[in-house]
Image (cartoon, rainbow, N blue to C red):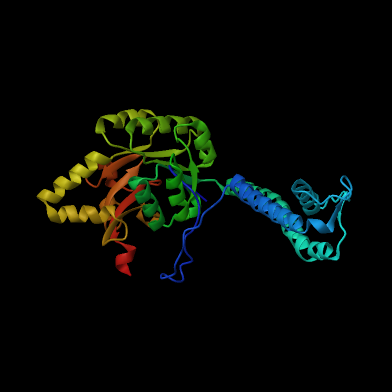
Amino acid sequence: MSHTVIGRSRSGVTGNGQDSAAVWLPSRSRTPLGAVMIRAALALALLLLSTVIVYAGRAGYRDAAAPGQPLGLLGALYYSAVTLSTTGYGDIVPVSATARLVNTLILTPIRVVFLILLIGTTLEVLAERTRALWRVSRWRSKMAGHTVVAGYGTKGRSVLTTLRDAGVPATSVVVVDILPHVVAEANQAGVAGVTGDATRRQVLASAEIAMAARLVIAVDRDDTAVLIALTARQLCPAVQIVAAVRESENEPLLRQSGASQVVVSSAAAGRLLGLATIEPGAGQVMTQLLSRGQGIELTERPVQAAELGRPARDACAGVVAVLRDGSVLALDDPQAGTVQTGDRLVVVGASSAGQR
């Protein structure tokens, strides 16, 4: 299975797809330290409650260290601590029927809850950590040929939408982003994510870049895109790198850094705006071509056996170009006179959504 890596990430699903009107309330996730602090506070509250109860009935207790004297506040606290922890040294004991009844009906349930809090906290922290490590280990074992997307802003989200529309499963995409809340957003979209700077080797390694088939660089800064491409190419010489840059003057630099394909976002947007201004109809067609599933769309497929040896323009309906050895051949190019083995055809046709 092939996968793509995209910058900025996390993992998770927000709905079950069965009830679009279902209400999903936000949940608060606590850190292990936060869970321990809350339970420690509850345990302390139980200790103080027990101390108050014992001190209120202090006349019914006998302290071997101070025979004949009423139990003091410190003694009540000490007795509560050793009782709730089930230590029970026996130097302070209930002697009256009331004190024994209070110990049986009130202090014993408090002791049980106290122990549950202490043991439950340890088990919860250990179980959650073990579960998280197991999930990450299992995920890493399945990552191969995936797509990594670096940067989950407007461009990164559009990349993910296009990949999904093309049938790429969310489980084969990893998002890398430096902002935790952005990675959480990717998780909600069902995509795994890595939080960190994609220019760092360790961060890309965490996204299993060495096993990835493609890397999509969709960050906002051109210099950052160059550094990501250099780092990724060093970690995985075979990975296909597709990157976006804002300025056309940085395109050669990014190609020299190892990018297989470079999209100049500002220039492309400007040309589309100019085309839509001068020729609105042509601009609308280009917009549909860029938006998968709307009216018409541009697709790429391998040449079929029945098409070999035929002129490219006659190979199939809607063919607009031939891809050969990394070059794009127009239909009037002499080299496109016959379709060869290994060629790929770029075809314009009705979108699958439009056909339905």
- Give the image location of residue 104, x and y in percent: 81, 64
Looking at the image, the residue that sits furthest to the front is 68
Q: In this view, does 329 lie above or below 97?
A: above
Q: Which of 284 and 74 is in front in this view?
A: 74
Looking at the image, the residue that sits furthest to the left is 278
Task: Name which quarter of the figure residue 304 lies in.
Answer: bottom left
Q: In this view, does 317 lie above or below 215?
A: below
- Give the image location of residue 54, x and y in percent: 76, 56
Answer yes or no: is residue 13 visible. yes
Q: Which of 230 and 342 is in front in this view?
A: 230
Direction from residue 340 to residue 14 in the image, left or right:
right
Q: Which of 117 and 141 is in front in this view?
A: 117
Identified at 31% across, 29% down, the residue is: 252
Task: Name which quarter of the figure residue 243 lies in.
Answer: top left
Identified at 28% across, 52% down, the residue is: 290
Direction from residue 190 to residue 290 in the image, left or right:
left
- Give the image location of residue 305, x and y in percent: 40, 55
Answer yes or no: is residue 319 visible. no
Identified at 18% across, 43% down, the residue is: 271
Direction from residue 46 to residue 278 in the image, left or right:
left
Instruction: Count the numbered circles shown.
Output: 0
Q: In which quarter of the image is the C terminus?
A: bottom left
- Give the image location of residue 168, x and y in percent: 44, 54
Q: Which of 124 and 195 is in front in this view?
A: 124
